[in-house]
Image: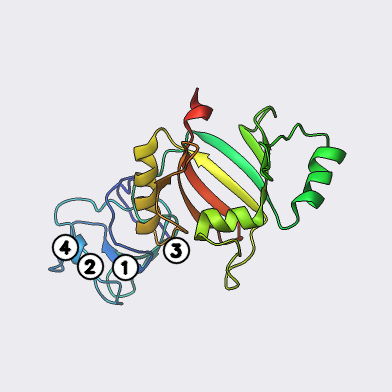
Amino acid sequence: MRQPRGRIRPGNHRALMKAQHDVHACVRQHTHGRSVASASPEAGDCATQVGRWVDLAVGVRFVQDRDCRHCFYGRMTSGVGRPPIKIEFLATIAMIAPDPPVSRRLYIDALGLPLESGAAEEYFHTEQLRGCKHFAVWPLREAAQACFGTETWPADRPVPQVSIEFDVAGASAVQAAANELIAAGYDPLHSAREESWGQTVVRLQSPEGAIIGVSYTPSLHE
């Protein structure tokens, strides 16, 4: 395995393909009668950019093609060439609690965290912990309601143990992030929306089973 000669510019924001597929790309001035846009993931196809260098995304591993010394077999390993979502800060860590009273005994009684809730609420939280904008114990049934509109977590999905939310610069950036996640092959648990407390958020479930939110929470930006 070796890198092709010439300039391969990591971070270029033009997508060379719609998903994480294998593709043959010509990285030198070489004519095969195809354009980058029409390159196929099928073996043997060779994309061209006649007279110019092909700009490949970050996270591409190269292996020289045995039939074409100018061509390199590449696998996209970290995205599809799009600009990354701009995260402003880690906003929320919430422990998902199947049995909220048991969880509260640890976080409030044993650890002494200053978690509080509103009247008749089981969502206990604080914004007084250094290093964390918002920490909470979130009942599983409330998480299920937020994600699926039901108080029962779907049996075909792993039960989450934690929810982590990353804040972006504004409400419109949440929708843009949702679009980027979908384009990257992720399936959000719900569309980007504004919650009753003013937060705009889109959530998905990570490969580890965690609830991951991209959000804009106005009160955390003040």
User: Image point 63% across, 42% down: which residue?
Assistant: 93
C-alpha span from label 1 to label 4: 12 Å
The kind of residue tagged 1 is: Val
- Per the image, label 4 sits on a secondary structure element best described as loop
Q: Earlier in the sequence, mark 2 or mark 1?
A: 1
Can you give x and y, in whole percent of width and height, for residue 77 in the image? 44, 59
Q: Does residue 70 appear anywhere in the picture?
A: no
Q: Which residue is mark 4?
A: 35
- Per the image, label 2 sits on a secondary structure element best described as loop
Q: Earlier in the sequence, mark 3 or mark 1?
A: 3
- Per the image, label 1 sits on a secondary structure element best described as strand
The kind of residue tagged 4 is: Ser
Can you give x and y, in whole percent of width and height, for residue 20 in the image? 38, 64
Label pair 4/2, CB-CB below 8 angstroms: yes
Label pair 2/1, CB-CB below 8 angstroms: yes
Q: Which residue is mark 3?
A: 1
Mark 3, other Cα within 10 Å: few <14 / some 14–19 / many ≥20: few
Q: Is residue 85 above or below residue 139?
A: above
Query: In this view of the protein, which residue sits in the foreground, 189 or 26?
Result: 189
